[in-house]
Image (cartoon, grey):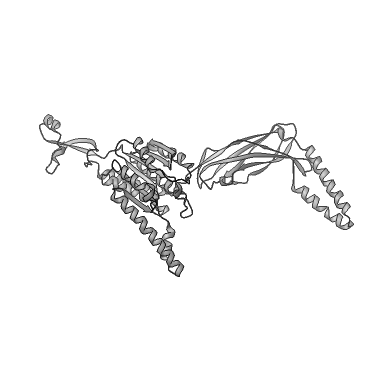
Amino acid sequence: MHITGWTVALAALGAVPAALAESRSVAWLWALGVVVLALLDVWLAPATSSIGVRRAAPGSVRLTESTTTAVTVANLGRRRVRGAVRDAWQPSAGAEETRHAFALAPGEAETFRTRLRPTRRGDRAAGAVTVRTYGPLRLAGRQRSVEHEAHVRVLPEFASRRHLPSRLARLREIDGRTAVQLKGAGSEFDSLRDYVIGDDVRTIDWRGTARRGEVVVRTYRPERDRRVLIALDTARLSAARVADAPRLDASIEGALLLAALASKAGDRVQATAFDRRERARAASSGPQIMPALADALATVEPSLLEPDWPALVRLVQSRVSQRSLVVLLTTVDTSAMDSGLIEAVAALQQRHQVLVGSVEDPELGAMIADREDADALYGAGAAARSLLEREAVAARLRQLGAEVVLALPDDLAPAVCDRYLALKASGRL
């Protein structure tokens, strides 16, 4: 049962005769009459069981974009029905105008659409569909909630995709410049050509020379089948908010942009989200990697745990056997000295090329620039010390041979890709 605003208005109207008569009895009689009329209206209202409900929700939507969910209401009874339906969703789904009024003749159906604009990534669940029918007096009616399970997967925003065209142009430039350059023992054979003065004698193909009767050398092209493994740290430090968003969100943006660029370069891309165990995984080649990676990372949330770096090293070693680019998107600070990050990078660098990407807090720069009073000076000193300690950890990682990228949240993704392109141009992959 439910009551409408007309019932409240009618009950409030009883204050007028009660005030004129200056009698409480009139007020009680008026209230009793309103209750009787409301109960009568409920009895005359069509049964909610005569209303059929069906809900259809989209599979996924990207964060900051909008989509719609549909609720179809059908009159299965023999009476004309007036009522309303509510398509409920959890608050972070961003549902707008969830209540819809209907008036259906027998056998008639109508579909209502609710606009969703999610505010958080992950799986956003729907609530119950509530159906109300009104009595002829529109004072009250019947109500029933129907559980229809539905959810929408909110994918990461991938705002960094605006940087992809410029990086792809840079990639084409690198591929064109290095098409026939020797890049070491791991390069792919391209073709044979005549020897010219200045060629490395180690590139001479002696069998081809014997067949042709003249000296020929082998030319090479860059490998198109490199491995790139992206590891996102989802431990407790990834939950810290930087520029009004968790560190993990900036890491996800970096992983998506790098995966898109590396897949265009012909590399095989794998990704894992890890703290003390693997939280998500995606592995594919070509354009299939992007939907798989976005879907896998959509539901990843920070865990209030310390990272298990030795376990991650074992995981990487089990996933990639040949030399690969291992990208660790984590937090570089003084805690890395005790957490095991240094030792993990040292172990991985022995066999792979490691790239460490970390988000910098823009508030530290603002604190250093603020020198207005004594408190600000103390804050500037603390911020400067924090940056020096972070730079010391980064320097230690560079001594091990790893590449280190420290950037603001919006700059991390393009900075990581620029370092990837630099490694590719120098032949270090």
In front here: 143 or 314?
314
Which quadrant holds the C terminus? top left
The quadrant in which residue 267 appears is top left
Q: What residue is drawn where x is 79% and y is 37%?
A: 43
In front here: 353 or 236?
236
In front here: 11 or 361?
361
Q: Position of residue 81 (x, y in %)?
A: 73, 37
Q: Residue furthest bottom?
A: 373
Asked if residue 350 can be seen in this view, the reply is: yes
Q: Position of residue 381 (x, y in %)?
A: 40, 64
Q: Position of residue 95 (x, y in %)?
A: 59, 45
The quadrant in which residue 383 appears is bottom left
Against 380, is 131 above or below? above
Q: What residue is drawn where x is 60% and y is 38%?
A: 70
* Number of numbered discs visible in the structure rendering: 0
Q: What residue is drawn where x is 35% and y is 35%?
A: 318
Which quadrant holds the N terminus? top right
Q: Is residue 56 left or right of residue 239?
A: right
In front here: 427 or 133?
427
Q: Is residue 29 left or right of residue 276?
A: right
Q: Position of residue 66 (x, y in %)?
A: 53, 45
Q: Residue furthest front?
A: 338
Q: Residue furthest left?
A: 213
Asked if residue 166 can be seen in this view, the reply is: no
